[in-house]
């Protein structure tokens, strides 16, 4: 079982650019949540996708958007990048209706905005 | 004021020491309390979780929740160098997986051989 996989591992973007991050959930999981973890901080919830729809959203601007595909994989898109968007972006997968303790995190994508 | 407060450390202890990690919170609606361990350049992994108040033990790890004081703790006995990591507390109001976990800042722990 490959677990939750995220790509790319690292990337560097320039202010104002757009970025797409990808997540493949653990086998058997159908729900994907995205978190932003700034350096020295805990993860902050961005949004959750299930059945290809955004089901829950945290306190993030509309520049952050997502998508879920029929195979349950997901993308996180960030437009008009700001320096403050530099962070580790984590994807967590789980099963709908499951416990909040049953989510598995990927290794994250380290985004640096210069 | 953040909903969950956690001292970022760093905390440095000798091998074999007992480690105490703590979080305080302000939202009395929190019912589920979790501890995650995050190694450098890795995602968080769930260590333990507790529902409501009380203690829970798993090997060298003990989690405690005191809802009256809005205070949770994680104790690590006989600490090992492999325990060196960042420890994150997380909380949720319900049991359902809404993804809306509220995390603390994380405490960086170093266990020296």
Image (tube, rainbow, N blue to C red):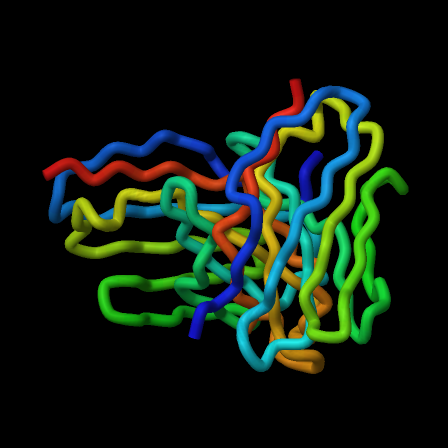
Camera-nearest residue between B51 and B46: B46
The image shows residue A103 at horizontal and vertical percentages of 56, 68
Report how many numbered discs are placed on residues in the image.
0
> Is residue A59 shown left or right of residue B106?
right
Q: Taking A100 as reference, is A14 above or below it?
A: above
Give the residue at x 81% y 43%.
Answer: A64
Vertical relation: B91 (above or below) B112: below
Residue A109, how many percent across, how many down? 56, 43
Q: Quadrant of residue B4?
A: top right
Q: Nearer the viewer, residue A67 or A93?
A: A67
Which of B21/B102 is in front? B102
Instruction: Decide if residue B36 is on the left or right side of residue B104.
Output: left
* Residue located 34% across and 44% down the image: B85
Residue at the extreme top:
A114
Which residue is at 55% across, 37% downward?
A110
Indicate left or right for A64 with A38 as reference: right
Q: Residue at x 52, y 57 (%)?
A: A106
x and y percent of residue A9 in the render? 51, 43
Q: Quadrant of residue A31 in the image?
A: bottom right
Residue B69 showing in the rendered view: no
Query: Does A83 sit left or right of A91 as displayed?
Result: right
Horizontal and vertical percent position of residue B105:
54, 39
């Amino acid at each position: 079982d490959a677990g939750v996989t995220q790509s790319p591992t690292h990337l560097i973007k320039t202010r104002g650019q757009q970025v797409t991050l990808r997540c493949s959930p653990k086998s058997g999981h159908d729900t994907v949540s995205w978190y932003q973890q700034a350096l020295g901080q805990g993860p902050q919830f961005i949004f959750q996708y299930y059945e290809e729809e955004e089901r829950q959203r945290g306190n993030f601007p509309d520049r952050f958007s997502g998508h879920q595909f029929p195979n349950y994989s997901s993308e996180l898109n960030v437009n008009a990048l700001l320096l403050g968007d530099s962070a580790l972006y984590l994807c967590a997968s789980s099963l709908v209706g499951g416990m909040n303790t049953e989510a598995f995190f990927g290794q994250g994508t380290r985004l640096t905005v210069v | 004021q953040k909903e969950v407060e956690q001292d970022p450390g760093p905390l440095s202890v000798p091998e074999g020491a007992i480690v105490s990690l703590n979080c305080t919170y302000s939202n009395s609606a929190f019912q589920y309390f979790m501890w995650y361990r995050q190694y450098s350049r890795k995602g968080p992994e769930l260590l333990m979780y507790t529902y409501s108040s009380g203690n829970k033990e798993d090997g060298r790890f003990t989690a405690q929740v005191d809802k009256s004081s809005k205070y949770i703790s994680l104790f690590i006995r006989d600490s090992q160098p492999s325990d060196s990591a960042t420890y994150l507390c997380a909380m949720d109001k319900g049991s359902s997986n809404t993804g809306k976990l509220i995390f603390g800042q994380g405490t960086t722990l170093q266990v020296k051989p």
